[in-house]
Every structure is written in structure tokens, then in C-alpha cells.
Image: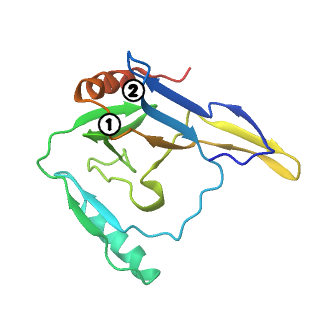
Amino acid sequence: MLTSGLTYKGLTGLGVKNSQGTVVFKLEGVYGIGGAGGCTTYFKFDDDSSTYYNSIVSANAEVSSPAPTIVDLRGLPYSTIILFGTKMRRIGTNLYWDTDPAVTYFEAACGTQERIFTFSSPQFTISGPQITPETLGNYQFEVPKTVTAGDLIKLDAVLNSLKVK
């Protein structure tokens, strides 16, 4: 997800492997996010916010998109993870991150944000010909669907232990 021909400085990728050497988590820097906007899916937790949901419905209506399909996650067990200050929940191999940790609700990212974390730290800097240097904290992530339950528990511990210095 990084454009070739540019220079990148900082964390642009991270992989976590299990004891057999299989990748159980990937984090990759992203430069040049595009999308039509709007959320087609809304992830509803027990502590979600009706205000947040209504803002998504309104934003979709502004671009003539229907209300999002609600994926009801209420009552399902989840693991809590704080990765580089970003609060998230893991259900199986799916990660959901909170777009506004300042509120007491869990407002799961959707649309183009759904698969891309935006960190204030770590970040990476982009420079190159005919481009003004820019610093970004956009990272796509993946937990392969084949990761075992035991590896997921270990992954939670690893992700919770990562710090930026």
C-alpha cells in the first residue's frame, strides 16, 4: 500500500509470527487512501452510541447511500486490546477499533476506516521528487482467518505489550 519511487522513513510495517513462523498479524503503512465514503456496515456493540450511528446514517444519506447494514455484536465475548494507544476489540480474527476513545461508548470504525488504523504514534514520513514531505500514521492490518484460538490469545498479549518510544 506504499507508492513506489518515494522515500519512507519510520515504521512502515510490522509482522507478528507464531512459534512455527506463521504470520498471525500484519500491520502495513498506507499512503494514498481512496474511497467513496460512507459506511455499508455498522458494528453494534453493547456500549455503542446511537448518536454515532445516526451520524453515519446522515453521512450516507448525503452521498445517496442507504443506511448501513447492522452487524449485531452485542453479547459476544471479545478481547480488549490497546495497540499504540488505540482501543480495539477482537472477536475471533476480526479486529474492531474505537474511533473516539475520549467517549465512554465504543464507536467501531466503518467504511474506509474499518481496515485502517490511524495512529498519532507510530508514524512514517514520505518524501520524494515533486512531493512535499508528509508524516502519516495510517496502517492497514490483517489477522489471517486461519489463526488458531491459542495463537489469538498470544497475539492479544503481544499487541497489548507494544509501545512506542
Residue at the extreme right of the image, as rendered: 129
Residue extending farthest to the left is 75
Q: In this view, does 153 lie above or below 123?
A: above
User: Disc 1 residue type?
Assistant: Thr
The number of numbered discs placed on residues in the rendered structure image is 2
Tell me where residue 72 sits by quadrant. bottom left
Neighbourhood count class around disc 1 (C-alpha, 10 Å): few under 14, some 14–19, many 20 upward: few
Disc 1 secondary structure class: loop
Looking at the picture, does residue 65 appear above or below residue 98?
below
In this view, the residue farthest toward the bottom is: 64
Q: Distance between the residues labelled 1 and 2?
A: 18 Å
Q: Where is residue 111 in the image (x, y as percent from the top left)?
A: 43, 62
Residue 95 in the image: state x and y as whole percent: 34, 43
Image position, residue 65 (x, y; %): 40, 80
| Residue that label 1 marks | 146
Q: Sequence-wise, which precedes: disc 1 or disc 2?
A: 1
Going by the numbered disc 2, the residue's amino acid type is Leu
Residue at position x 29%, y 40% from top?
89
x then y, percent, for residue 124: 66, 36
Residue designated by label 2: 159
Q: Residue at x 74, y 42 (%)?
A: 126
- Residue that appears at 30% across and 62% down: 42
Mark 1, mark 2: which one is toward the viewer? 1
Judged left or right of residue 11, residue 83 is left
Q: Is residue 93 left or right of residue 110?
A: left
